[in-house]
Image (tube, helix red, strand yellow):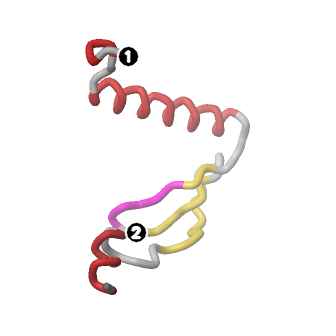
Amino acid sequence: MKREEYISDEMVVKRVNEAVRIELEKKRALDVPIVTYDRETQIIYQENNDGTRVEVGRRMRKGRYSERVAKEA
C-alpha cells in the first residue's frame, strides 16, 4: 500500500467509536448486560437493561505498566 492509501488517525478513531456504539446498541437490543468502566471512580460496573448498575470490581493498580516495571527494575 502506498502512503496515500492509508486512512488518517482521526478516521480510525471515528470508526472505532462507531463500532463501539453499534455493539452497545446490539447488546441492548439482545438484552445482554453491558460492562462499563467509570474513569472517575475507577469502578467496573455491569449495567442491565432495566437501568440497574452492579459493581463488579475495582481497579487494582495505578499507573501505566511501563511506569510500574521501571520502578521494580
Near-viewer residue (36 or 7): 7
Which image quadrant is residue 23 in? Answer: top right
Position of 39 relative to 17 (above/below): below
Which image quadrant is residue 41 in? Answer: bottom left
Please name the residue shown 34% across and 77% down the image: 69
Residue type at tag 1: Met
Residue type at tag 2: Gln
- Is the Cβ of the residue at disc 1 closer than 8 Å to that at disc 2? no
Please name the residue shown 28% across and 78% down the image: 70
Would you say the magenta stretch is mainly helix, strand or loop? strand
Crowd around label 1: few <14 · some 14–19 · many ≥20 (10 Å): few
Q: Earlier in the sequence, mark 1 or mark 2?
A: 1
Left or right, 50 with reference to 61: right
Position of 41 relative to 3 (above/below): below
Q: Quadrant of the N terminus?
A: top left
Residue 41 bears which disc, if any?
none
What is the x, y in percent for residue 35?
Answer: 57, 54
What is the x, y in percent for residue 65?
Answer: 36, 70
Look at mark 2 in the image and give the residue it sits on.
42
What is the x, y in percent for residue 11?
Answer: 32, 24
What is the magenta range?
36-40
Residue at disc 2, secondary structure: loop
Left or right, 48 with reference to 70: right
Please name the residue shown 31% across and 85% down the image: 73
Near-viewer residue (23 or 69): 69
Q: How many marks?
A: 2
Asked if the stretch drawn in magenta spans residue 39, the answer is yes
Please name the residue shown 60% across and 50% down the image: 34
Near-viewer residue (8 or 44): 8
For discs 1 and 2, the disc positioned in front in the rendered view: 1
Look at mark 1 in the image and give the residue it sits on.
1
Crowd around label 2: few <14 · some 14–19 · many ≥20 (10 Å): few
